[in-house]
Image (tube, rainbow, N blue to C red):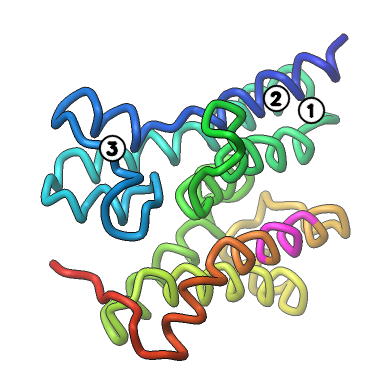
Amino acid sequence: MELLFVIFFSYISGSIPFGLILTKFFIATDVRKIGSGNIGATNVLRTGNKVLAISTLVLDILKGFIPVVLTEIYFSEYVQLSALLAFIGHIFPIWLKFKGGKGVATYLGVLFALSYGLSILFIFTWIVVSLIFRYSSLSSIFSTLTVLVVTLFRQSVIQAIDPNFNVGEDIKLLLFVFFILIFFTHRKNISNLKNKTEKKIKI
């Protein structure tokens, strides 16, 4: 029963399409019909409404953070399952015929629940790469890869930035799966980067 509850709650939490809900409610726009067609914060920003974009970002982070934290408190043995399902819920939401977002903000929310140190590493890397290249997709992929590489090969670094984080094989596998999924959801962006047609971040 506990397992079923964690599966249901984590997936449903992750599957809430906040970007679509906010844009439809406040500006009567279907965010799937503009820009990249994605429901995430980056595409919401293309509506020209920064408040909605920031709101989408925060809510997408929280829908990864909250289920994992609650699972850690009440059903700690299922934390990694909760993290994975919240993430998958965002990418493959049942409400949108399993066509969701790219998962970066929800990934960050999960990461915050697992390790503040790694979350800060992700954010720092994302900001640096985005300032240099101005591509959100490249920043997301590179930041996710950085977290994975540090976790796989630099346990001493992780212990330095987050002494309370337990670097086990299961966590390494989970972060590897996250990277593969984020790489998969950005496959079109990767093609655009190769063809030099990827849109840059406008600030």
Tell me what residue is drawn at x 84 percent, y 57 percent: 168
Mark 1 secondary-structure assignment: helix
Q: Nearer the viewer, residue 20 or 171?
A: 20
Kindly indicate whether the residue at mark 1 contacts the one at mark 3 (C-beta within 8 angstroms): no
Q: Which is the main secondary structure of the residues drawn in magenta?
A: helix
Q: Three-letter amino acid code at disc 3?
A: Asp
Q: What stretch is highlighted in magenta?
A: 174-179
Residue 93, position as x, y percentages in the image: 58, 34
- Tag 2 secondary structure: helix
Residue 137 x, y percent position in the rendering: 43, 70
Residue behind mark 3: 30
Q: Residue furthest top?
A: 1
Q: How crowded is mark 2: few (under 14 residues within 10 Å), some or many (20 or more)?
A: many
Task: Please report the residue visible at 56 percent of the width from the left and 60 percent of the height from the top.
Answer: 118
Mark 3–mark 1 distance (CA, rounded to whole Å): 38 Å
Instruction: State how far apart marks 2 and 1 are (Cα).
Output: 6 Å
Q: What element carries label 3?
A: loop
Task: Using the image as rendered, state which of residue 137 and residue 199 is in the foreground.
Answer: 199
Please tell me whether residue 175 belongs to the stretch shown in magenta. yes
